[in-house]
Image (spheres, grey):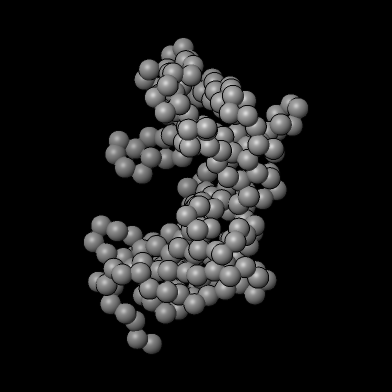
Amino acid sequence: MAFPLLAAAAAVAIRCSAPDVPIRSTAEYSPVSPGVAPTLMVTFASRPTSTQAEAVLRACIAAAAKTHRIGAEMLANAWVGEDGPLTLPDGSNHLSYDPKTGGVKTWNEREGVKPKVESVAGGAYFTEYKEQKVLVPPYGKFATVNVVFTKPPTEAAALAAVVRELQTAVKKQTPLLHTTGYAMTGRRSDPASQEQIRARNGKYIVLEFDPKSGQITFWGKLMGSMAR
């Protein structure tokens, strides 16, 4: 079988689908180029479930591997229009394909990350907390807290909940980590249904905890603090 040259960095279409997923999708493979890893992006015409998204990603990885020489680890992710990468069943946003072994892992499997999902009394939302490695020097770790509401909250309620859950998470950290909190809506049973919430000003409700200052901020606005 002839393989295309890896020097060409332009994305190419991949024909692929999963038999049990009726949602139309397109896939593009971007070959490896100097300083850039190969990627595979699947774009759905309408929102799939997280299980459907992973099934199509795996089918498209297999199709790409049959027709192209993939010379380095490839990351694959799923989108709906410009919304993504979609979250897969185990909380990952990517699949990783190893061309040396032909193996496919979720990003959480690859990194040994196990998100901790907890319900909150009252059932208005649940949280997902995870710590991940920083992939560039000086390395270390960072953390994220997703606060996922079952019904769209008011902006004030969303902000208050994210501040509260950031404080709860940080109290358990040793050492303290840069931690980002997201306000979202969606179903616990289907991570791909979860979408970020926007504030009235159009910005996503994303709060940052800085371990150096001990401050929690929302787009630069002080929302709270933690003792260092």
147 vs 29, left or right, is right
> Where does the N terminus fall, quadrant-wise?
bottom left
Q: Residue furthest right?
A: 122
- The spot of residue 61 in percent (x, y) is 49, 69
5 vs 64, left or right, is left
Quadrant of the image occupied by residue 8: bottom left
Residue at x 28% of width, y 77% of height: 5
Foreground pick, 47 / 213: 47
Residue at x 42% of width, y 28% of height: 219
The correct choice, above or below, for 89 with respect to 218 in the image is below
Foreground pick, 73 / 6: 6
- The spot of residue 186 in percent (x, y) is 65, 44
Residue at x 70% of width, y 29% of height: 120
- The spot of residue 87 in percent (x, y) is 56, 51
- Asked if residue 143 shows in the view, the reply is no
- Asked if residue 89 shows in the view, the reply is yes
